[in-house]
Every structure is written in C-alpha cells, then in structure tokens.
Image (cartoon, rainbow, N blue to C red):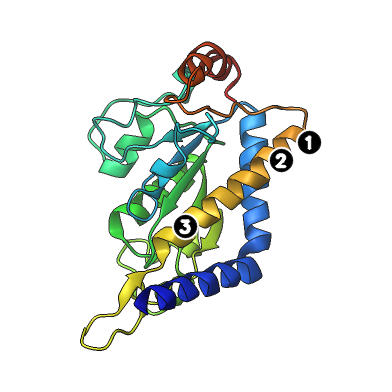
C-alpha cells in the first residue's frame, strides 16, 4: 500500500534526522534557552509552509515563541513591549526585509528562525541576511541535499546555510518529494514539513529542559478549549511572559 510506503519513508526520515542532526538540535535548543532566559526574544518566520503555527500559542507549547511577519505592515505586532529607543533607527524607505526588521519588535541578540528548503528562496535569504547584519542570531531550516544542487540568487552570492548562525538540515531530498508512484510523473509526499515540525519540537524540548536546569520555568500554555485552560493562560502565563519574557 502507498500508505505503508509513506509511513516507512517518514520513519526513515526521522531516523536520519536523529542520526545526523542531534548535535545541532541540542545547540539550537541551548541557544533558545539562553536567549529567552537572558530576556531576549525568539521569533519564528514561516517554516516550511507554516509549520511554525504548530508551536505558536497552542496547548503544550511555550509562550516565548512569537511569530515574525515578513509583511512590513504586520512586522511590529507580536512580542512583549521592550524599549528600542537606543537603537536609533530612522524611518525611511529601504528593502522590505530591512524595513520589516527595523520596525518589528526584534532586537540584536534575539533569535529569528527561518526556512528555505532549497536554501536560496530570495525573500527568505534576504530576511536572514539582513537579520544577521542587524546582530540577530539566525537559525535556518534547509535541505542540504537540495541546497547543494542549486545556485544562489541573493546578491550576496550566498545560500542560507552559508551564513546562518546555525543550520538545521531537515533531511528532505532534493526537490522535496520522497516516493516514486507508478503512473504519476512527479514524486509524491513532501518531506520538509513533517521533518521540520519534528525537529522544531525536538529543539523546543531541549530548550525547555535547559531552562529548567537554569532555574527558569518557561510558561507552557494549556489548551484554551479545555476547562480552565483559557483562564490559566490569560491570568498566569501571559502576565508572567509580559514581565519576564518566558
């Protein structure tokens, strides 16, 4: 059955991630823990067609993840209020990525998580490039197998993994899909989404454990639809995050 083949492919994908990415997953989790414990922010841009939504403000997830909107009109929405007056930015017309970063709630020393499976998506590479120039730490999701087979398109001449602070290989095959199916020309079943979700929750597990070791208890949300969950989030978790950032 195709279903069985798919499930076996996913099992193999997860095994490859564990075999090749565990060290970087631990590094990423520790980076996030240290950033949050130190008062910094962690912002998730789009990860493989919106996998970030599986981690942002949901039952069982940490409050400290905030969405980063590349849309310059929305980039300043999320994250607790912090003083940015000393940064000295002037409002002017600049490249979209630079503008979005400058007028968002992100600061030097914060972490921005970005994703491009090919490693060369122009808007993603530009956002990551500008973030690094700003002093933001960039954790990048990419497929190294894919990225090594394509040419860069960014003016820097670089692909995402060549300058990101830390790169996580989602282990997707080049061009994404995993399975040959008789009668269909294109391969079937994209790998990067389910792989990135698996990696991101693994990273988060490391971050939560590290924060607890540091004596910092991260706010973990309850399901808003379970009795008492919404009150707990609004009365306990959100006020604590607003004060401490975790």
Q: Mark 1 = which residue?
A: 213
Callout 1 touching callout 2 (CB < 8 Å): yes
Element at badge 1? helix
Q: Where is the N terminus found, in terms of image quarters?
A: bottom left
Give the percent coordinates (x, y) of residue 201.
Answer: 55, 48
Q: Is residue 138 left or right of residue 2?
A: right
Q: Give the CA separation, mark 1 to mark 2.
A: 6 Å
Element at badge 3? helix
| 225 w.r.t. 173: above or below | above
Q: Give the CA separation, mark 3 to mark 1.
A: 26 Å
Give the percent coordinates (x, y) of residue 105.
Answer: 42, 27
Of the pair 85 and 46, the residue shown nearer to us: 46
Q: Give the CA separation, mark 3 to mark 2.
A: 20 Å
Q: Is residue 103 left or right of residue 171?
A: left
Q: Is residue 213 left or right of residue 49?
A: right
User: Residue 209: which numbered mark, if any?
Assistant: 2
Q: Mark 3 = which residue?
A: 196
Q: Residue at x 57, y 36 (%)?
A: 109
Q: Residue at x 29, y 80 (%)?
A: 187
Query: Could you classify mark 3 by the number of other residues whose Cα lies within 10 Å: few (under 14), some (14-19), or many (20 or more)?
Result: many
- Decide if residue 59 is in sight here: yes
């Amino acid at each position: 059955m195709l279903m069985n083949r798919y499930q076996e492919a996913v099992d193999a994908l997860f095994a490859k991630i564990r075999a090749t990415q565990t060290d970087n997953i631990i590094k990423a989790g520790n980076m996030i823990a240290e950033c949050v414990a130190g008062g910094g922010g962690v912002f998730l841009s789009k990860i493989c067609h919106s996998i970030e939504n599986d981690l942002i403000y949901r039952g069982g997830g940490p409050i400290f993840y905030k969405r980063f909107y590349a849309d310059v009109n929305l980039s300043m929405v999320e994250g607790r209020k912090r003083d940015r007056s000393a940064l000295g930015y002037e409002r002017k017309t600049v490249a979209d990525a630079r503008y979005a970063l400058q007028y968002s709630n992100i600061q030097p020393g914060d972490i921005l998580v970005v994703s491009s499976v090919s490693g060369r998506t122009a808007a993603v590479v530009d956002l990551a490039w500008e973030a690094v120039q700003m002093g933001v730490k960039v954790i990048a999701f990419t497929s190294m197998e894919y990225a090594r087979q394509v040419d860069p398109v960014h003016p820097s001449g670089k692909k995402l993994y060549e300058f990101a602070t830390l790169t996580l290989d989602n282990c997707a095959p080049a061009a994404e899909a995993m399975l040959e199916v008789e009668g269909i020309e294109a391969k079937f079943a994209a790998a990067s989404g389910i792989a990135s979700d698996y990696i991101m929750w693994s990273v988060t597990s490391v971050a939560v454990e590290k924060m607890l070791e540091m004596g910092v208890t991260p706010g973990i949300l309850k399901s808003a639809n379970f009795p008492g969950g919404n009150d707990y989030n609004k009365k306990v978790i959100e006020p604590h995050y607003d004060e401490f950032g975790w």
